[in-house]
């Protein structure tokens, strides 16, 4: 199995303000990501490609999402580390052999591809997302 860092997802309360700040900081234009770009409803974001490294700013548009709960508990900050894989099923099997169990019984699929997640308790406080891009 080979994992490649895809980027990080940062939970933010005010998406337009955060987007403007990160665009200025890195000198890149962000791409808006609507609800259909996420595995779960109630989220929107901005994707910034900074030299091939993806910084995703994510805001919750509904109460009760994982991002909303994260913001309530910890405030704004790094929400997860995203790793891209060529074969999500194979990577999931490899991680299970290492004792890591995915959060979802079956990967979430959408126009973005397929994803599964690993709880922060399993990885020193950092949630891991495995993504197989469409």
Image: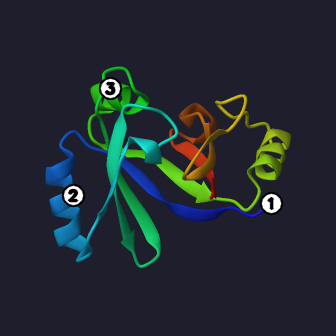
Q: What secondary structure is marked by label 2? A: helix
Specify the label residue 73 is tagged with.
Answer: 3
Quadrant in the picture for the N terminus: bottom right
Residue 23 x %, y %: 22, 68
Residue 89 x %, y %: 79, 47
Mark 1 / mark 2, whichever is N-terminal: 1
Residue found at x 14% / y 52%: 17
> Do tag 1 and tag 3 residues touch (Cβ < 8 Å)?
no
Q: What secondary structure is marked by label 3? A: helix
Rounded to the nearest whole Å, what is the CA distance between mark 3 and mark 2? 22 Å
Q: What secondary structure is marked by label 1? A: loop
Q: Nearer the viewer, mark 1 or mark 3?
A: 1
Mark 3 / mark 2, whichever is N-terminal: 2
Q: In which quarter of the image is residue 122?
A: top right
Disc 2 crowd, CA 10 A, few/some/many (<14, 14-19, 20+): many
Left/right placement of residue 67 relative to residue 84 reads left
Q: In this view, does 41 lie above or below 36?
A: above
Residue found at x 43% / y 65%: 54
Q: Mark 1 points at which residue?
A: 1
Q: Is residue 123 above or below residue 18?
A: above
Q: Name the residue under label 2.
A: 19
């Amino acid at each position: 199995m080979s994992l490649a860092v895809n980027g990080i997802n940062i939970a933010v309360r005010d998406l337009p303000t955060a987007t403007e700040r990160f665009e200025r900081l890195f000198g890149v234009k962000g791409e808006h990501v609507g609800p259909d770009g996420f595995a779960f409803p109630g989220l929107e974001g901005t994707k910034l490609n900074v030299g091939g490294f993806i910084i995703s700013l994510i805001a919750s548009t509904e109460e009760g999402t994982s991002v909303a709960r994260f913001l309530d508990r910890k405030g704004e900050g790094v929400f997860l580390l995203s790793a891209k894989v060529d074969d999500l099923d194979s990577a999931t099997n490899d991680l299970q052999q290492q004792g890591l169990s995915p959060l979802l019984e079956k990967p979430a699929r959408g126009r973005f591809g397929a994803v599964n997640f690993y709880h922060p308790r399993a990885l020193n406080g950092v949630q891991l997302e495995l993504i197989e891009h469409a």
